[in-house]
Amino acid sequence: MKNFFLIISILFSVVNNSIANNLEDFEIEGISVGESLLDYATEEKIRSIDAGFEYKTDQFTTYRFEKIHELKQYDKLNVSVKKNDKNFKIVGVTGIYYYKNLDECNKLKKEIQSYIKKEFKIDDSQITKFASDMDKTGKSIIYGIQNYLKPYPNLESININCYDFTKESSMNANLKVSVNTHEFMKFIINN
């Protein structure tokens, strides 16, 4: 497992000392929204790393970036683009870190949130807690913070979520840090 404190130290060095208000200023593993996946691999290679996520509609495709790029901070990295976009422009990036217990995740979530509030102009933050629909028992809970960079109804956001899965679910508890454009976040909510 990666040393997550490395994530925090690298995360703190990403943005210069001015307050940022653009999603493009937030990097996860050196990747940011607005870049092209073609800067990292050929189209053929990109298509070979499709994550195979099944959404209700197929407007977007998610790729497993760690299959083409060695990760230093996270255990996995999902990168999403609009389906059939010939430029493979990134609309969402999610770093995934597997944690040992919820206290560890909550501590990391708090540290990341502190950094985000210090470095980004946040219009609104929401603390959330809800059952994960990935666990049919309803016992697994997602504890999150959603940071919106623009006023509602814009959904452009930087999100920090602790997925606290039960042992019965057979899923690994994880921290997800994601940055999503308005269009992609709206898609996620509805799909």
Image (cartoon, helix red, strand yellow):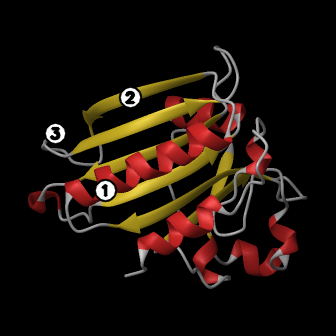
- The kind of residue tagged 2 is Ile
Mark 2 secondary-structure assignment: strand
Can you identify the residue that label 3 sits on?
Answer: 138
Q: Position of residue 184 (x, y in %)?
A: 66, 38
Name the side, left or right, on which 152 lies relative to 170: right
Q: Note whether 113 is above or below 95 in the view shown.
A: above
Q: Comparing marks 3 and 2, which lies closer to the viewer?
A: 2
Mark 1 secondary-structure assignment: helix
Crowd rating for badge 3 (residues with CA inside 10 Å; few <14, some 14–19, many 20+):
some
- The kind of residue tagged 1 is Cys
Name the residue located 60 percent from the left edge and 82 percent from the top edge.
67
Mark 3 secondary-structure assignment: loop
Which residue extends farthest left?
Answer: 168
Can you identify the residue that label 2 sits on?
Answer: 127
Q: Residue 140 carries which label?
A: none
Q: Note whether 148 is above or below 171 in the view shown.
A: above
As measured in the structure, the alpha-carbon distance from the residue carrying label 3 to the one carrying label 2 is: 19 Å
Q: Where is residue 16 in the image (x, y as percent from the top left)?
A: 78, 54
Q: Which of marks 3 and 2 is nearer the N terminus?
A: 2
- The kind of residue tagged 3 is Gly
Of residues 8 and 54, the one nearer the viewer is 8
Can you identify the residue that label 1 sits on?
Answer: 105
Name the residue located 79 percent from the left edge and 43 percent from the top edge.
18
Q: Where is residue 45 in the image (x, y as percent from the top left)?
A: 75, 81
Q: Which of marks 3 and 1 is nearer the N terminus?
A: 1
Of residues 189 and 121, the one nearer the viewer is 121
User: Which quadrant of the view contains residue 40?
Assistant: bottom right
